[in-house]
Amino acid sequence: MRLQSFRASVALTLLAGCAVGPDFKKPAAPDVSSYTAQPLSAPTATANVTGGDAQRFIQAADISGEWWTAFHAPALNELVALALKNNADLEAANAALRSSHNSALAARGGFFPQISAGFNATRQLTPAGALAPTPADNSSLYNLFTPQLSVSFVPDVFGLTRRTVEAANAQAQATHYAMLATYTTLVNNVVSTAIQEAAVREQVDATRQMIDAETKALNILQYQLDKGYASGADFAAQKSALAAATASLPPLIKQQVQLHDQLAVLTGRFPAQMPPSTLRLADLTLPADLPVSLPADLVAQRPDILQAQANLHAASAAIGIAIANRLPNITLSGAAGNSALAFGSLFTPGTDFWSIGAGLAAPIFQGGTLLYQERAARGTYDQAAAQYRGTVLTAFQNVADTLTALQQDGDGLKSAAAADDAAKASLDITQYQLQAGYAATLALVTSEQAYSQAHIGLLQAQASRYADTAALFQALGGGWWHRTDLNGDKNDK
């Protein structure tokens, strides 16, 4: 008898250690050694130009948890701090994380017995001579008091509870990484919007200066026309140039206001509450060292990749849940309590009762519901696997595009600076020649337009280099694993 009991206990233990369905394994890192088809080269530097500092790519370098401070701009740091404190999207993502974490904890309750207590007090009238039990004195009208404690437990023989908890934990992880993706996107949006707003504001200033210069030139031509030194055609050409410059100003102002309003929302404020920005491109220091994580590390850093992996894990556990639902369930139950006709007689000898039971329930015919639920779970897993691969590919494309952009930004800024210098020199010479009577008005109009376009192009090239530098930090994961305030853990990386 003891040997049989021992064998039964061992068999039950072995069954309890088995969970049906696939055991999840993290996908292997992509078998690639670089992001771009061509080897990376250091971006071109341009001396004596804002944003023209030298940069270099550092392979396998780590990313700071506060990478934006590498721009050494206090105004930018303040905007990021306000966004991390007040942004509504990040607050909502943190609330979703708390909800999913508690849902995962709630699922663990299935590992423990469910215990409940109850107390019933009834007054009953039974027909005289009824077959139903009556008190010993054959009273047909009596009170009945019954306190009772009930216990039920479902042994996790086939791993239904374990797979359920596994799925809940994976879903909580997916929510965690979704919050981190919101964080990295928010920081990059604040930085890039602030840079773009500063660039557009300087374009507005440059356009206004150009309008002032062309207005002065028009006044000169008006004087010369009155004296007979200039033709009506020259005056009309300059007037047309002034009108074109003036017409280009409202779109820039609109863009500047929209960027200002976007910064307000990102930092959790209404547009009317957002003070004018004081950040200028010249206040930014271009980070010299650009980290380039190894491809194998990227899949452990990017929140979107980790979220897709967690979704894949949850889909894997869902297969086990679907399989376990097709297998028998064992329920152990017990109850104990007292029953007395008078409240004061409770818990006296002879009033207690108890029961112990076990039940087995197995699905026999469900019209194919459980079978197709399992097949649906497998299809969902295949979908999640494809989405994971797509997310990885998109992440690598994102990094590759950003690295290429940084290389081209260096060349583009060098060309834009040269074009700006040449256009400014040409405009200065033309203005001098016009005042001395050596140049035609049409030449001045052409020089003014060329310089205006070249200078705005330079401002845009400077902004692109700063913004693409920020985009690289986001593309590589944003350094969230160094920030304890994000409820992250370096071991999650």
Image (spheres, rainbow, N blue to C red):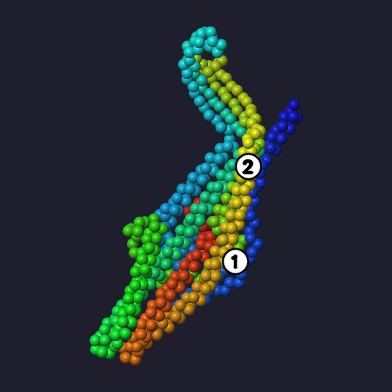
Q: Can residue 3 be seen from the camera position used here? A: yes
Q: Residue 244 lies in what quarter of the image?
A: bottom left
- What SS does tag 1 mark? loop
Q: Residues within 10 Å of mark 2 (few under 14, many from 20)?
A: few
Q: Residues within 10 Å of mark 1 (few under 14, many from 20)?
A: many
Which residue corresponds to the image point at 49% horizontal and 63% vertical from the top-left? 67
The numbered disc on residue 372 is 2
The numbered disc on residue 35 is 1
Q: Is residue 16 above or below residue 73?
A: above
Q: Locate residue 218, reporting x and y percent.
A: 29, 81
**Among numbered discs 2 and 1, the one appearing first in the sequence:** 1
Q: Locate residue 120, reporting x and y percent.
A: 49, 22
In the rendered structure, the answer to whether residue 75 lies left or right of residue 395 reads: left
Instruction: Name the residue nearer the viewer: 110 or 445.
Output: 445
Closer to us: mark 2 or mark 1?
2
Which residue corresponds to the image point at 57% horizontal and 53% vertical from the top-left? 308
Which residue corresponds to the image point at 55% horizontal and 65% vertical from the top-left? 399
Identify the amino acid type marked 2. Answer: Tyr
Instruction: Name the residue nearer the viewer: 490 or 50.
Output: 50
Q: Locate residue 311, reporting x and y percent.
A: 57, 50
Q: Quadrant of the N terminus?
A: top right
Q: Can residue 491 be seen from the camera position used here? A: no
